[in-house]
Image (spheres, coloured by chain):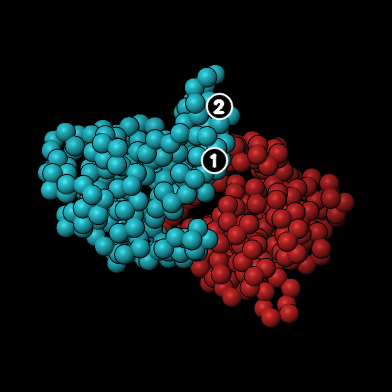
Chain colours: A cyan, B red
Amino acid sequence: MTAPRLDFWYDFSSTYSYLASARIEEIADDAGVAVRWRPFLLGPVFKAQGMETSPFNLFPVKGAYMWRDVARQAADLGIPFRQPTQFPQNSVLPARIAMLGFQDGWGEKFTHAVYHAAFADDRPMADAGVMRDVLSGLGLNADEVLARAQSDEAKAALRQQTEEAQGLGIFGAPTFTTSGGELFWGNDRLPQAIRWAQRHAAA
Amino acid sequence: MTAPRLDFWYDFSSTYSYLASARIEEIADDAGVAVRWRPFLLGPVFKAQGMETSPFNLFPVKGAYMWRDVARQAADLGIPFRQPTQFPQNSVLPARIAMLGFQDGWGEKFTHAVYHAAFADDRPMADAGVMRDVLSGLGLNADEVLARAQSDEAKAALRQQTEEAQGLGIFGAPTFTTSGGELFWGNDRLPQAIRWAQRHAAA
């Protein structure tokens, strides 16, 4: 019997991915479900649907609601949240770094630190200086990681992961996928996705 | 102290409104929250955002997901669901009739019956014959109700309710509004909206 597993697809600029990142470990651990963290880029995914920016910017009345909704949800979760000055942020740099982090074993703590910088401290994640602070704060060699993040290999790894997301039919973030190709979109669906992974763990 | 109250804004063509309609009474009763059912039309609301049809049709990959998601949610709720042949259905006629129903005291049971016709039996709600069957099935004088639904008064009542929804910043359905102007969008937010209504009942 294969252990139940869930893939957590997220973009660093996504507010609801931030909410999911703050609760997924506890929920999955309690349920005995292993989580694979899969950063990807929403930009190409939105573009393929004919959108040049976040739907929250394209539909302003929905966007205004989103800010209120995320603030309420963050309060319920007991996590800090401040509406960032810019939205969406360019998330290419942190996503490339995260790909390295998941190779090296520090991807999850890096993700938490970037989300905190972006949505608690309103710092620009596309800024190399901000990334340097985040990496140093985790005890990593920031210069070395930033250099590797500019390599063709790191760029290709993120591109490939984003293409895999599109191939799975992912159209937003966060998305949770389970074995058997079942897809759940949105932080709200996390508990249901976890139950699905438990029930459908391959025998 | 005013009793806690929630307004439930729904469109008859909305799949997630159907899901909400199936569970709102039990959840609200258990919580001691009174619910006011407010049918309205999503068409003008989408049009004001620059959309000529449902976003689930404008963004097909999201639409495909929606059908899967609603089927899963309906299964979890233990209610029947079949993807209707046409989507979205024109919901003007049932919405006008519902406005009369809430005057006369049969609005809720009429709403349940229309949703069942549409999403369990795949019957076209814009068809006067279908509405006649639904009304007769509730023991009502179908001819009399259908005639009243074509009156200027019934048309104006629905138009006014839809304008009120837009004035509240409603951009989709279902939406729940509570005193103090707090707005919650989507069936997923129903429990949170109920808790908000309880906590913020005017002293």
Asked whether, in this view, residue A153 is left or right of residue B140, the answer is: left
Residue A78 image position (x, y, % from top left):
48, 61
Residue drawn at point x = 34 percent, y = 44 percent:
A108
Element type at marker 2?
A: loop
- Looking at the rendered image, the disc whose residue lies closer to the viewer, 1 or 2, is 1
In the image: residue A3, left or right of residue A88? right
Residue B160 visible within the image: no
> Can residue A181 be seen from the camera position used here?
yes
Tell me which residue sits at (64%, 63%) in the image. B195
Q: Write down the quadrant of residue B161 in the picture.
A: bottom right
Is A150 placed left or right of B3 in the picture?
left
The x, y position of residue B74, in whole percent, is 64, 40
The residue pinned by badge 1 equals A30
> Quick check: B123 above or below B16?
above
Q: Callout 2: residue from which chain?
A: A
Q: Residue furthest right?
A: B139
Above/below status of B39 relative to A155: below
Q: Position of residue A155 (x, y in %)?
A: 18, 38
Q: Which residue is mark 2?
A: A200
Left or right of residue B62: residue B17? right
N-terminal of the two: label 1 or label 2?
Answer: 1
